[in-house]
Structure formats: structure tokens, C-alpha cells
Image (spheres, helix red, strand yellow):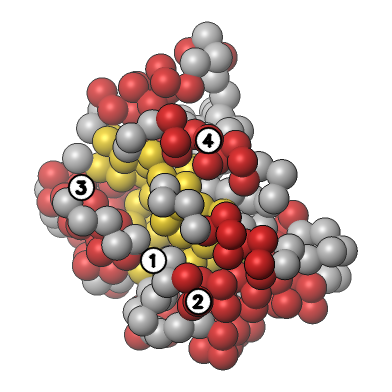
């Protein structure tokens, strides 16, 4: 039992599986990765991620516009709300702020993020937040537009413990990717040690960021095992404990009854 809480299944490399997504999902299942959250990045791929979630019992979807994929015409809240109405859509996003790769359109990123937060607050589905080099603005927008009863997750977390702590206080979960296995990530591993187990999720963010020992290769959901193993080692827990606790956290956050 293990969940990959953030993957881009419409973008992963299916060459090793003769182009068959079901075989990649099966390969993950054989390593105990029994559920996946397939993340939307813009309106163009929303139908694709929803179709994937419809096809597989154990795959859920999110809908939103990634901060690095926003266009001049921001996605209207109505459009997001309509997509969010689908029963397999369990989250809004990914959305958020990325000032590391794109700092010239901060205002548009903020507006887009605020819209997603309002949609999440309105429909009651939690938000998947991408945040990089935008600590204060991310927290301020969550505070201003989020619904404290809905919350969400800061995905592929690479920021400071102080930011994690502030988000946890607002009811958020912190999701770690393969980056925590990278040699130069000692500071981030210290954050992993401090995040309470009951607020922690694991993800691949595949096809990006494959964990050690696959670093540099194309990532896929089955490698979330290596992320969970790293968490277990840092926390002094068994792999089974990390797998079951992060699965429970996933259910709790996304309102999925067992
Ligand atoms: Zn992201
Ligand atoms: Zn992503």
C-alpha cells in the first residue's frame, strides 16, 4: 500500500511498456504503489487526465493551470468549477507561484492562484500547490483566499522548515519528491525529519525528478517507493509504516473513504 500523490501520467515515457499506460500502472502496482493522483497542468490536458482517471479505478485526477503554463487569458473560475464537479477529480491544481523560473509575470501568477484558491474553497476540493521562491506571497494568498476547512498540499516541497511549519499550521500537508534523495539535499532532508508524519505525503512528480539511483532517467510512479524508503530512513520508521501513514494522509486530505 503506497500512494504516488503527484504524477503526470499523460507525460510519462511509455516506451518501456510498448506505449501501454496500463502496463506502467501495473508495474507500479507490483511494487505496492496501488493508487495515483494524476495532475492537470492546463485546460489543454484536463480532458486527458480526467480520461485517465475514468479508465483506472485506482487513479484520481486534479484540474488546474500550472503557474508556468498560464496564458494571457486566465482560466475563468466557472470553467474550473465545472471540471471540478467530476467525481474522479479530487483536487484543484496544480497551481501556485514559481518565481524561480518565471518572475516577470508575478501579478498574473498571483491572480491565477487566487482564482484556484477560491474555486477550491467553493467546491470543497483541496488544492495542489506548486511553490518556488515565492514563500511569502504563497502563504499570504492562501491566507486571503483559501478556506481553512479545505486546505491542500504543498507539492514537491523544496522550501524552508519555516514555510512548511506555517503551511502545516494552516492545515496543509507537505509532499516530498525524489529530490530528498539527491546528494546535495541535506537541508531539505532536515525539513523531512521535522514535518510530522501525519502531515506528510510522497510523490514522484514523474516524468520529472527521478530519485536516486534512477536520477537523470525518466521518472515514473513505481519509483515513489524510493522516496518513501528515504522518508523511512530519515524518520527511523519502517517502510510499511511510512506507506500506510502516507496512504491514510492521502485519504484524509482528499476525502477518500476506505
Ligand atoms: Zn509542480
Ligand atoms: Zn507537477
Label 2, residues with CA under 10 Å away: few <14, some 14-19, many ≥20: few
Report how many numbered discs are placed on residues in the image: 4
Asked where in the image residue 58 lies, by quadrant, the reply is: top left
Disc assigned to residue 243: 3
Residue with the mark numbered 4 = 51
- Nearest to viewer (mark 2 / mark 1): 2
- x and y percent of residue 230 in the render? 30, 47
Give the answer, above or below, for where 49 lies relative to 120: above
Between the C-alphas of marks 4 and 2, the distance is 24 Å
Looking at the image, can residue 20 be seen?
yes
Label 1, residues with CA under 10 Å away: few <14, some 14-19, many ≥20: many
The answer to whether marks 4 and 2 mark residues whose Cβ atoms lie closer than 8 Å is: no
Residue with the mark numbered 2 = 122
Between the C-alphas of marks 2 and 1, the distance is 22 Å
- Nearest to viewer (mark 3 / mark 4): 4
Helix, strand, or loop for circle 3? Answer: helix
Front-lying residue, 101 or 256: 256
Label 4, residues with CA under 10 Å away: few <14, some 14-19, many ≥20: some
Of pointers 2 and 1, the one earlier in the residue sequence: 2
- Nearest to viewer (mark 4 / mark 1): 4
Disc assigned to residue 174: 1
Helix, strand, or loop for circle 4? Answer: helix
Residue at 66% over, 70% down: 77
Amino acid at each position: 500500500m503506497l500512494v504516488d500523490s503527484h504524477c503526470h501520467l499523460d507525460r510519462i515515457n511509455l516506451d518501456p511498456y510498448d506505449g501501454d499506460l496500463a502496463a506502467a500502472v501495473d508495474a507500479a502496482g507490483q511494487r505496492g504503489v496501488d493508487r495515483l493522483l494524476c495532475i492537470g497542468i492546463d485546460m489543454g490536458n484536463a480532458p486527458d487526465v480526467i480520461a485517465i482517471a475514468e479508465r483506472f479505478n485506482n487513479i484520481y485526477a486534479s484540474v488546474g493551470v500550472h503557474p508556468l503554463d498560464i496564458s494571457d487569458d486566465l482560466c475563468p473560475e466557472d470553467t474550473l468549477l465545472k471540471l471540478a464537479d467530476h467525481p474522479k477529480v479530487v483536487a484543484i491544481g496544480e497551481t501556485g507561484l514559481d518565481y524561480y523560473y518565471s518572475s516577470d509575470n508575478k501579478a498574473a501568477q498571483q491572480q491565477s492562484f487566487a482564482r484556484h484558491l477560491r474555486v477550491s474553497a467553493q467546491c470543497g476540493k483541496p488544492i495542489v500547490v506548486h511553490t518556488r521562491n515565492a514563500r511569502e506571497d504563497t502563504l499570504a494568498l492562501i491566507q486571503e483566499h483559501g478556506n481553512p476547512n479545505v486546505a491542500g498540499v504543498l507539492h514537491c516541497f523544496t522550501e524552508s522548515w519555516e514555510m512548511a511549519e506555517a503551511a502545516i499550521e494552516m492545515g496543509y500537508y507537505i509532499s516530498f519528491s525524489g529530490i530528498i534523495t539527491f546528494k546535495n539535499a541535506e537541508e531539505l532532508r532536515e525539513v523531512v525529519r521535522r514535518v510530522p508524519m501525519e502531515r506528510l505525503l510522497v510523490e514522484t512528480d514523474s516524468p520529472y525528478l527521478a530519485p536516486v539511483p534512477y536520477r537523470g532517467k525518466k521518472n515514473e510512479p513505481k519509483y515513489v517507493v524510493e522516496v518513501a524508503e528515504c522518508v523511512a530512513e530519515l524518520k527511523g520508521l519502517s517502510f510499511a509504516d511510512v506507506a500506510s501513514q502516507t496512504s491514510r494522509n492521502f485519504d484524509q486530505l482528499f476525502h477518500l473513504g476506505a
